[in-house]
Image (cartoon, rainbow, N blue to C red):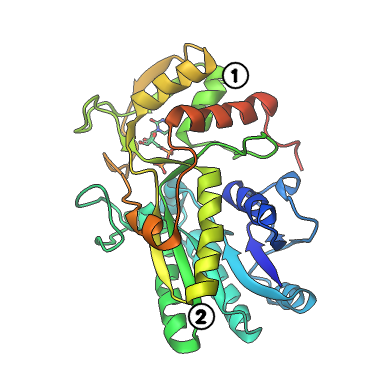
Amino acid sequence: MAILVTGGAGYIGSHTVVELLAHGEQVVVIDNLQKGHAQAVQTPVFYKGDIRDRELLDQVFRENKIEAVVHFAADSLVGESVQEPLKYYDNNVIAAHTLLTKMIEHNVKKIVFSSTAATYGEPEKVPIVETDATNPTSPYGETKLAIEKMLKWCDRAYGLKSIALRYFNVAGAHPDARIGEDHTPESHLIPIILQVALGQREAISVFGEDYPTEDGTCIRDYIHVMDLANAHWLALNRLREKGESGIYNLGNGTGFSVKQVIETARSVTGHPIPAIIAQRRAGDPAVLIASYEKAQAELGWKQRYNSLHEIIETAWNWHKSHPHGYPRD
Ligand code: UDP
């Protein structure tokens, strides 16, 4: 039986494919390559296409014995989602609806879903636990939460078992630097900082220095992409063994400010990485830190990369060896 990974050509999807293969799983990927890269697909069984394409999904489920789905395919930029909410409802909610409909039709009843800390919105307290209030402040968070709720009702009605993983800030790359992060345009902090170290940008703009934190910059919880990938495999096994749906945070439980991230990147790269203070970015909470106790207790999840230095080092190895990302598709 195989695992179907939607969005397996994307950043987190491609790393999860590698992790699943390393554990002896058979993996089938579907990706429309709108944001993903053909070179990132690490399994030979690859369908290029969209999960809103019902006929293609029928074909994938007919041609492969699919045991479970790991669902990444989605749009994931907070700012863009505020500008284009309908695109997010289409690419995220409608796409998930189509996928779930086809899963039920083909009697596939297990799914691991890529969710986000953006489902919480502005946290009431940190560290955030899974039972805290969910009040998303963007269509991105709202669409991911809508899918979580759709999954809950599909469990009740059809016995579809799901695990939703709420990611905090994902960073780093596979330790052998074969695959890594490549977004165009790039908007995430660590890759942008590393573009400065590569001489591709003059400076990093720090979005706001007047937050109620020790150094005035935002604090985030950075988790290594391979640790995250491993959690997907553990979630799959939990579904196999316990058959219980659930929601889990995934973060390191430690916060780093934007200035601390820049300082660590200076030490990793040996580059001065000039920083300039800019305006706050709309919708950024001051502090986001995960409690990962539930994932640790129930999934048996344990981080292999819990130092920011190591996380940035793996990202740096990828960016140094692929200064322009993947060869253009
Ligand atoms: N950030 C920044 N400059 C940048 C990009 C990001 O200061 O060029 C800050 C951003 O305001 C946030 C943190 O870095 O506080 C992490 O942002 P990122 O976009 O990487 O992830 P997010 O927290 O939005 O998921």
Residue at coordinates 55% horizontally, 62% vertically from top-left?
A: 91
Callout 1: SS: loop
Q: Which residue carries the number 1 mark?
A: 198
Q: Is residue 110 above or below residue 167?
A: below
**Mark 2 or mark 1, which is nearer the start of the sequence?**
2
Q: Nearer the viewer, residue 133 or 163?
A: 163
Count of residue discs = 2
Q: Is residue 139 above or below residue 320?
A: below
Q: Nearer the viewer, residue 240 or 3?
A: 240
Q: Position of residue 201 (x, y in %)?
A: 54, 20
In the rendered view of the protein, which quadrant contains the N terminus?
A: bottom right
Q: Is residue 81 above or below residue 268?
A: below
Q: Position of residue 21 (x, y in %)?
A: 69, 55
Q: Quadrant of residue 282?
A: top left
Residue at coordinates 51% horizontally, 49% vertically from top-left?
A: 228
Callout 2: SS: loop
Ligand 1 within 8 Å of the CB at mark 2 = no
Label ID, residue 172: none
Q: Quadrant of ligand 1?
A: top left
Q: Position of residue 179 (x, y in %)?
A: 67, 40
Q: Residues within 10 Å of mark 1 (few under 14, many from 20)?
A: some
The answer to whether residue 248 is seen in the rendering is yes
Q: CA distance from mark 1 to mark 2?
A: 46 Å
Residue at coordinates 43% horizontally, 37% vertically from top-left?
A: 306
Which amino acid type is shown beneath numbered disc 2?
Leu
Q: Position of residue 164 (x, y in %)?
A: 45, 64
Q: Which residue carries the number 2 mark?
A: 160
Q: Quadrant of residue 175?
A: top right
Select label 1 or label 2 by which is in front. Answer: 2
Which amino acid type is shown beneath numbered disc 1?
Leu
Compared across the picture, whether 181 is left or right of 113 comes to right
